[in-house]
Image (spheres, rainbow, N blue to C red):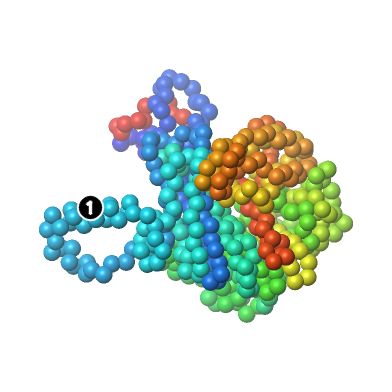
Amino acid sequence: MNRTTLSLIAVATALAAVTGFAAVSAPDPVDPTATAKTPARLPVERSSLLCPAPSTSELAETVYTSFTPAGTTGAGTGGAAELAPSAAPLTDTDPADDEKKTDEDKAKDDEAKDDEAKEPAADGADAKVKPFLALKEPGKPVSGTKKGADAPALVGAATGPLAPGWTAQQTTTVTAGDSRGLLGMTCTAPGTDFWFPGASTDKSRQDYVHLTNPDDTAAVADIALFGKEGTLKSDTGEGIPVPARSSVPVLLSTLTGEAEPNVTVHVSTRTGRVGAVVNATEEKNGGDWLAASADAAPRAVLPGIPGDATSVRLVVFAPGEDDAELKVQLAGKSGTIVPSSAAEPLNVKSGMTASLDLGDVTKGEAGAVRIGPAEGGRETPVVAALRVVRGKGDNQEVAFIPATGPVTERATVADNRAKGSTLTLTAPEKSAKVKVTASAGSGGGEQVVKTYTVKGGTTLAVTPPVPAGLKGSYALTVEPESGGPVHAARALAVTQDGVPMFTVQTLPDDRGMVSVPATKEDLSVLK
């Protein structure tokens, strides 16, 4: 094998590591006499997703929706996209018994396993070893429901044409109790590093970090906590084992004796990889999932604040060695303003968590918070999230919005309903033209496509298009067509007994396509 071939393998391996879940194939052979070309854009061949255990409430009802957008041809034909309980299959037999079996016995066992894999998912113990949700084709979502407190964490992978842009949504409704509310999250890709500004160790909160390991080998994770004065002391946050194909919830208040309302959580792994997400529950305001912030950057956009939000709190953390002095703005329907509550720059000390209460900042119009260096300030990377409350008095509900990157090529969110869905599109700089596709429904219906123009510096909130003849739920896919960057979010709202329950999911780019450098010689075979 020559060095050039080795280099290509290294490039493909690096690309998979960067995406966290993508696999790509070698590009087509090129003319060895040709000059260097622009890297080819190829669809990923494999995607991985993890969904944490949804709830400990017996009143919980969780809807899972799996979807791959149509229009991107994955490598090869066929493919599969399945979500299954994370628990490793259990066996009542002694491993030594396998050595005593004849070849015919082993063949029968293999055949039985194949038949078992084809059976539909079922409740109870059998569901732990069989796929729960299987997607058959791009462009049409599939849904499944679990009730009660025993719904497990799910792990899964998509291959072939089902891999590019594969997404899964987990939406849980809890009608009573401390965790009551609408809890939604987009299932995450496994990784090795996550930041969660907006968590809490306060006595009024119960925040759990859910660590899910999709692999067949154990992972070891560290959890560090940062408050307004810096690192919170902890003797138990390091070296947390996460067994193979399992999920471990960690209560933040058990990691430290310091109670703080605004905490930044850093999850990293020493070995292996995990999916990480925070489940936050408040005594009076219900609960929701807090997803990881976008990678630290000097500027951030947090889209999807409902127009009727009664309280918005910004939480920011500077993970580097430099302090950050930030200008906080609101991009609303008519333009970008500096709210009166953010008249002074927000100072964020290195390694410390800062917060800013913005009140009912949207004043009846949906918007997005923008943060960036104050005038004369340095370009300091930060991570950020919002705590958002709707309702008043005893009828309040909380949700969280992390900073999210722009949709560079495409982004999708599943489990949209005929009523209660709102799509927000924020163009922080230049005006942008965006195509929005409403997929076919999980139970029937035809896709609908609509185009929107978002003026620079504004947020456009719309009731998204609904598929013709919709039955079930559907997915929304956002694709920028021209203009400046666009950040997107979807809010799902349900009113239950006077409580305005809601959840917000941001739409980061799906990374369904990756760049593969062109080469100057035929590397399709090993030499």
Q: Quadrant of the N terminus?
A: top left
Query: Eyeballing the image, is 331 above or below 453?
Result: below
What percent of the width, then of the height, locates residue 78?
A: 38, 38
Pick the residue in front: 177 or 498: 498
Q: Amino acid at mark 1?
A: Glu
Residue at 68% across, 31% down: 482
Query: Eyeballing the image, is 389 above or below 301?
Result: below
Pick the residue in front: 433 or 522: 433
What percent of the width, then of the height, locates residue 363?
A: 83, 54
Q: Is residue 460 left or right of residue 164?
A: right
Residue for badge 1: 111
- Where on the picture, by quarter, is residue 439? top right
- Where on the picture, by quarter, is residue 474? top right
Pick the residue in front: 252 or 65: 65
What percent of the width, then of the height, locates residue 188?
A: 53, 54
**SS at mark 1 in the image:** helix
Q: Is residue 151 left or right of residue 448?
A: left
